[in-house]
Amino acid sequence: MNAHNFLVPMVVEQTGRGERGYDIYSRLLVDRIVFLGTPVDDMVSNLIIAQLLFLQMTDPKKDIHLYINSPGGSVTAGLAIYDTMQFLTCDVNTYCIGQAASMGAVLLAAGTKGKRYGLPNARIMIHQPWGGAQGTATDISIQAKEILRLKDRLNEILAKHTGKTVEEVTHSTDRDNFMSAEEAKAFGLVDQVVVSRKEIPGLAEKSSAVV
């Protein structure tokens, strides 16, 4: 099934003006929650970026909460989200539920230091980028050089956010490297493994009112 054509649940809330219906993602935005629950491609990237920019515009000082359950995907699309996260003035809390693999793991690590969380049964996977090349020998050489450039850049990003050296990250990403939430914490991809919202400082127990 196409990830962009799935059924989106609706929620109905009582407000001072009567009932009001939202698609579930718009309702989550009210509480400054962005959910990445698909592979990362250009369309998904643009939607995530638009939500981040909207929340920055509405309150440039209030935290954004990015929940990730993604197998990864396009490196360039993922880096567009990454750059936007770094561009914002608000802190971006990241949470891994299910899995954060490949670019999903990079985005998880890219959250604000001290505000990156993994749930107990989350799975995190890092590896080097992969891709195919075809065409003339010159074209293949150009594409290979670009993949190697992206590999180096991703390793630099992971080193920056985990506190590891580039050499350590390069070794760790040479093959698919699966980690539990606790292992991801030890590696520096997340700061805390949490079971409940109550364990996260400052996270409101009740969602905001809709008016």
Image (cartoon, grey):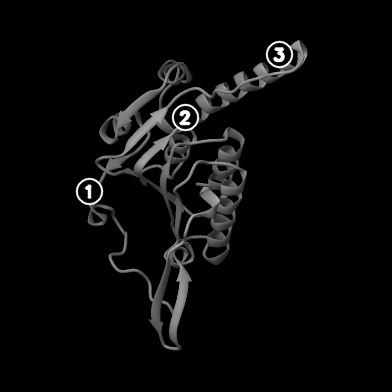
State the image coordinates of residue 167 (x, y, percent, origin top left).
46, 16
Q: Are marks 1 and 2 in contact (CB under 8 Å)?
A: no
Residue at left 54%, top 44%? 86
Which element type, helix, strand or loop, lies under badge 3? helix
- Number of other residues with Cα within 10 Å of mark 1, as a class: few under 14, some 14 to 19, many 20 or more: few
**What residue is pinned by disc 2?**
158
**Residue 56, can we see it?**
yes
Q: Secondary structure at mark 2?
A: helix
Q: Amino acid at mark 2?
A: Leu
Please tell me whether mark 1 or mark 2 is closer to you in this view.
Answer: 1
Tell me the SS state at disc 1.
Answer: loop
Q: Is residue 208 left or right of residue 141?
A: left
Q: Which residue is mark 3?
A: 141
Residue beneath disc 1:
195
Question: How far across and down, in percent of the image, does residue 209 sit?
Answer: 38, 76
Measure the C-alpha gap from mark 1 to mark 2: 25 Å
Q: Earlier in the sequence, mark 1 or mark 2?
A: 2
